[in-house]
Amino acid sequence: MKTCLNRQYISRFLLWGMSALLMAPAVMPHAKAASMNHAGMEGMDDMDMGDMDMPAPKPKPQQSSNPAQHSGHTIAPNKSTKVGTSAYPPVTPSAQWPATPPPVPKVHYVQHIHPVMDHNTYFHALLEQFEGRYTPGNSLFRYSGQAWFGTDYNKFWVKSEGVLDGHRRFSDGDHEFFYDRAISTYFDVQAGIRLDVDSGPTRAWGAVGVQGLALYFFDVSATAYFNNTGVAGKLEGSYDFLITNRLILQPQAELNFYSHADPERGVSRGFSDIDAGLRLRYEFKRQIAPYIAVTYAGHYGSTASIARNNTRMAENGPEDLRFTFGIRSWF
C-alpha cells in the first residue's frame, strides 16, 4: 500500500513540474518587464546617461510638389543636366549682347516724378464767329477767332476779331499775340501785346490775362491792357447747352472797359461797349457747324453818338439787334 501511495505522489509531482515548465516561457517576459519597471529601476538614480547612445527618431517623409510623385510615380532625373547648371546653352557675346552690359545712366527727376508724354507740340485753330449780321438798310460781316501752337504747358497764342460794314470799312480790329503758360488743369496765364489795326488810327497795348474753363465748364477770359495813355479791360464768356449731342445753344458776351476816352476810335470812359449773341448751331461734323443767331452790339457813354455818326466806323446804333447766320469751325 505504501508503495502505491508513493508512486501516486511521485507521478502527480512530475505532472505538476512538467506543466510548470511548459508555462514558464509565457510568464517570464511579463515578469521581466515588471521587474524592470519597478525593482529593476532601483539603483539607476546614480547612473550617468551621457555616455549612452540613444537611437535618433526617424524624420518624417516630406511631401513633394511634383504631381507625379503624389500619384505614386517617380520621375527619374535627367542625367544630361548637372546640378547647378542651366539647361540652355550660354549666349555668345556679340554687338547686340555684349559680355559686359553698358552702364545705365542715372536720371534725376524733378521731385522724383517720372516724365510723361506731355511735351509734344500741337497746333489748334478755332474760328468762333464767321457770320453775317443783317438789318434793314445796313448789314455787317464779323469774324472772331484764335489759334495756338505749342505744348501742353507753353504756347504761342494769337487772337483776332473785326467788323466789316456795308461800305467796306474795317472797324473794331483787335489783334493780340500772347505767350501762354498753363498754371492749373483748367486755366492758363497769358502775356503779350494787343494791336488795334483797322480803318481807324492804330493803337498798341501791353496785355496780361487769364483764360480757361470756370466751374461747370464756362469758357471765360479776362485780360487787362495798358499803354502810355491809360488802361483797359476785356471780359469774355460763353457756355454750350447741349440740346442733343449735335444741336448746341451757345450764349456769348464780350464787354470792354477803358480808363480814358478815345473819340478817334469810338471809345468812351468806363463801360464802353458790349457785343453779345445767342447762337444755335448744328454740328454735321465736329469740325464744322453752321448756326443761326440773334446778336446785339451796344455802345455806351460818348461812344453811342460816335458809333451812329462817325463814318469811319461801322454804323452801329446804341442798341443794334440783328439777325445773324454763320459758320463755326476748328481744326
Image: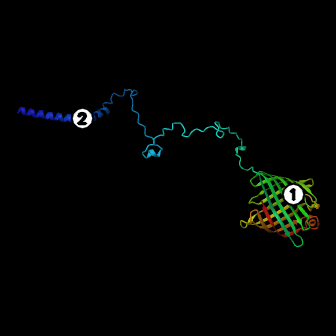
Picture disc at residue 25: 2
| Mark nearer the viewer, 2 or 1 | 1
- Residue 32: image location, x then y, percent: 28, 33
Residue 284 located left or right of residue 322: left
- Residue 196: image location, x then y, percent: 90, 58
Mark with earlier residue (2, 1): 2
Task: Note whether 149 is above or below 283 in the view shown.
Answer: above
The amino acid sitting under disc 2 is Pro
Picture disc at residue 175: 1
Q: Secondary structure at mark 1?
A: strand
The residue at the point 86 percent across, 56 percent down is 176
The amino acid sitting under disc 1 is His
Task: Note whether 114 is above or below 324 in the view shown.
Answer: above
The residue at the point 20 percent across, 34 percent down is 21
Residue 186 located left or right of residue 81: right
Residue 269, quarter of picture: bottom right
Quadrant position of the C terminus in the picture: bottom right
Quadrant position of the N terminus in the picture: top left
- Label 2 crowd (10 A; few <14 / some 14-19 / many >=20): few
- Residue 315: image location, x then y, percent: 91, 67
